Image (spheres, rainbow, N blue to C red):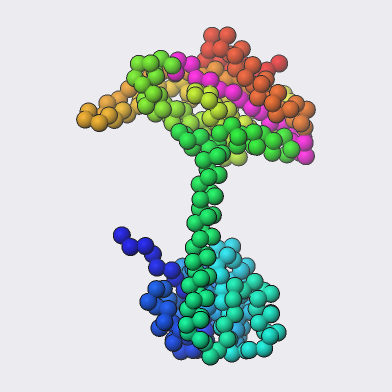
């Protein structure tokens, strides 16, 4: 499988001006040509290139205005642009570079020098993308649970801090639920951790379906999950009612039987049915009256009260 060749978009009202340079570039780059600024912007939006060669002197919309419109598009603002023009005065070059252009080439074009500049910029842009991708991957690893893909404790703490700050501004209550699965260890003991992992995946899916997109579902331990509800009501009693309804929805969902498809090398696929419930502790918070540490500690304490009440229950911290 061959890697994708870098793509260059050349915008010039007289494309023949760039044909000589294009002939030298087509050995290692895929080229597209546009004869006006608007056409170039449309092509770039349809298929964002790795670099843009942009003529300054064009009718209707010159290169400087075309550049301004290109960088106004979120998908295009980071693409390096090289201005290509017959204007050899210093002020024009300063204007182009001040706008943010990566480089400036004057006509007549020295093809050898231009090719090296373009290659260097394309390689730099590819490196920037690779670094950005690696940074995103590291952030995903740092802030998400590797098994379920849910936020982990680190991201949960950040989300709670944000919710507390928002609550202070709005006066609306939030709620944190500490959820511990009942009868989970018996599944691991009987069928192994791989089957237990399948159940945890299903639990994560069920929890996510029980809450709003704005809420947070996190996995904080082996069979421990935390749900945070934000922006409830501005009255404690009504917020408690809303949180209780969600907690009961979660408890009911997690009680439904789990049918886990087990695949092992050299064996036919089999299904394991498991019945599992959850003990849920709930605590309300508002206006940063309680610290983040105490919110989680109190929700955990309420969860143990649910355990002591016979499990498969919801208890509020009082």
Q: In terms of depth relative to the viewer, which is nearer, 6 or 69?
A: 6
Percent x, y of residue 109 = 52, 87
Q: In terms of depth relative to the viewer, which is nearer, 6 or 155?
A: 6
> Which residue sits at x=37%, y=76%?
27
Q: Quadrant of the N terminus?
A: bottom left
Instruction: Note whether residue 5 is visible.
Output: yes
Q: Is residue 187 left or right of residue 242?
A: left
Q: Is residue 253 left or right of residue 165?
A: left
Query: Height in image: 284 above or below 309?
Result: below
Q: Is residue 190 left or right of residue 205?
A: left
Percent x, y of residue 290 = 75, 26
Instruction: Note whether residue 284 is visible.
Output: no
Q: Quadrant of the C terminus?
A: top right
Query: Height in image: 239 above or below 56?
Result: above
> Which residue sits at x=55%, y=63%?
75
> Which residue sits at x=51%, y=80%?
114
Percent x, y of residue 300 = 62, 19
Count of labels in the image: 0
Percent x, y of residue 7 = 44, 71
Query: Height in image: 131 above or below 123?
Result: above
Query: Height in image: 119 above or below 291?
Result: below
Q: In terms of depth relative to the viewer, which is nearer, 186 or 94?
A: 94
Quick check: is 179 in the magenta stretch? Answer: yes
> Which residue sits at x=47%, y=35%?
146
Quadrant of res 235: top right
Quick check: is 180 in the magenta stretch? Answer: yes
First to last magenta residue range: 167-184
């Amino acid at each position: 499988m061959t890697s994708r060749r870098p793509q260059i978009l050349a915008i010039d009202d007289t494309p023949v001006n760039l044909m000589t340079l294009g002939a030298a570039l087509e050995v290692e780059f895929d080229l597209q040509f546009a004869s006006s600024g608007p056409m170039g912007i449309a092509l770039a939006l349809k298929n964002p290139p790795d670099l843009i060669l942009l003529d300054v002197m064009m009718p209707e919309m010159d290169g400087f205005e075309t550049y301004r419109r290109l960088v106004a598009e979120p998908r295009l603002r980071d693409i390096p642009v090289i201005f290509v023009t017959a204007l050899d005065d210093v002020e024009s070059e300063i204007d182009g570079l001040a706008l943010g252009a990566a480089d400036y080439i004057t006509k007549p074009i020295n093809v050898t020098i231009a090719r090296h500049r373009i290659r260097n910029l394309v390689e730099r842009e590819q490196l920037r993308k690779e670094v950005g991708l690696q940074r995103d991957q590291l952030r995903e690893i740092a802030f998400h649970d590797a098994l379920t893909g849910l936020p982990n404790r680190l991201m949960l703490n950040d989300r709670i801090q944000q919710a507390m700050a928002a609550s202070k501004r709005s006066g609306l209550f939030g709620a944190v639920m500490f959820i511990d699965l009942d009868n989970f260890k018996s599944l691991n003991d009987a069928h192994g951790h791989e089957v237990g992992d399948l159940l945890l995946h299903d639990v994560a899916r069920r929890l996510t379906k029980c809450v709003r997109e704005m809420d947070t579902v996190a996995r904080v331990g082996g069979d421990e999950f935390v749900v945070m509800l934000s922006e409830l009501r501005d009255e404690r009693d009504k917020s408690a009612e809303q949180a209780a309804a969600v907690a009961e929805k979660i408890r009911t969902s997690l009680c439904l039987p789990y049918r886990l498809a087990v695949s092992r090398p050299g064996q036919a696929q089999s299904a394991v049915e498991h019945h599992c419930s959850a003990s849920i502790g709930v605590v309300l918070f508002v206006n940063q009256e309680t610290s983040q540490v105490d919110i989680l500690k109190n929700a955990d304490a309420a969860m143990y009260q649910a355990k002591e009440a016979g499990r498969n229950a919801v208890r509020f911290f009082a």
